[in-house]
């Protein structure tokens, strides 16, 4: 019998996953306050794993734990998103350049290639949610291949905040066809060992993604997320 992956996870890890889903879906909206007991009831578990999960999510910048007052889901402003994208652009572009200098084999890049294939399949089916999930995996793998653990930690925290904004605008934007081409070009540059080109392509890609996201937020008067 195959093992049940859920059973191997701690309750606090499950609580982290479930709370993240509620935050990204908007069911726990930005600026809202929640008692630990309320969240525990909602998740069908005790308060201890919920408290542990809340501390983890506080470290990821998604909420604030307040003594004797429960948690508050932190809002993100348009200005916050501009600053976050600027930092991500620099760090991920550096990771792309570093990855190009590693001399990776075709096998080493297989995971990244698979994320692009998944994105293309999702776009063909106009499945934006599947595309966004594969896009997240691409950026995570890109930073991992860069090999800088501190960059990985910083990007992981900021990526969660970007993910919330992307989930809000995902169905407002045109199909991200150019994004997939950019991903292919970055991988080609990494495979060729061209650090300058890998950095330039990814920086341009991230700048374009920022423009699309910020313009959508402003056009739809979504000043806080």
Image (cartoon, rainbow, N blue to C red):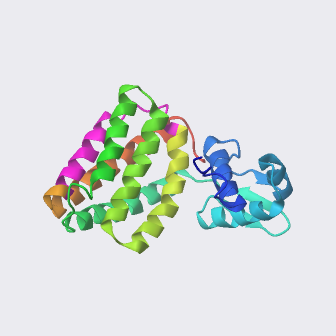
Q: Is residue 170 magenta?
A: yes
Q: Quadrant of residue 56?
A: bottom right
Q: Position of 63 compared to 106: left or right? A: right
Q: Could you tell me which residue is drawn at 63 percent across and 46 percent down?
A: 21
Q: Is residue 79 visible?
A: no
Residues shaded magenta: 169-190
| Drawn side of residue 55 relative to residue 42, left or right | left
Q: 162 and 97: which one is in front? A: 97
For the point 42% across and 50% down, the residue is: 137
Q: x and y percent of residue 58 in the render?
A: 65, 65
Classify residue 100 as left or right of residue 60: left
Q: Is residue 193 toward the left or the right of residue 166 in the image?
A: left
Q: Position of residue 28 (x, y in %)?
A: 71, 46
Judge whether 5 appears above or below 133 on screen: below
- Main SS of the magenta segment? helix
Residue 214 is drawn in which quadrant? Answer: top left
Q: Is residue 153 visible?
A: yes
Q: Is residue 216 above or below residue 194?
A: above
Asked if residue 136 is among those painted magenta in the image, a careful observer would answer no
């Amino acid at each position: 019998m195959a093992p049940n992956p859920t059973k191997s996870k701690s309750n606090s890890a499950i609580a982290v996953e479930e709370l993240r889903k509620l935050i990204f879906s908007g069911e726990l909206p930005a600026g809202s306050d929640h008692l630990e007991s309320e969240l525990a009831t909602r998740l069908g578990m005790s308060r201890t794993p919920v408290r542990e999960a809340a501390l983890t999510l506080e470290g990821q910048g998604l909420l604030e734990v307040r003594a004797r007052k429960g948690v508050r889901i932190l809002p993100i402003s348009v200005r916050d998103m501009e600053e976050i994208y600027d930092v991500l652009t620099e760090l991920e572009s550096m990771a792309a350049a570093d990855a190009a200098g590693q001399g990776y084999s075709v096998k080493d890049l297989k995971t990244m290639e698979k994320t692009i294939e998944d994105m293309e399949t999702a776009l063909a089916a106009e499945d934006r949610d599947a595309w966004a999930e594969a896009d997240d995996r691409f950026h995570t793998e890109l930073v991992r291949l860069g090999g800088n653990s501190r960059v990985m930690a910083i990007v992981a925290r900021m990526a969660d905040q970007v993910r919330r904004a992307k989930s809000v605008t995902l169905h407002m934007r045109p199909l991200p066809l150019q994004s997939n081409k950019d991903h292919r070009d970055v991988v080609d540059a990494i495979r060729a060992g061209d650090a300058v080109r890998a950095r330039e392509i990814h920086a341009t890609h991230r700048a374009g993604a920022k423009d699309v996201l910020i313009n959508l937020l402003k056009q739809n008067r979504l000043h806080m997320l």
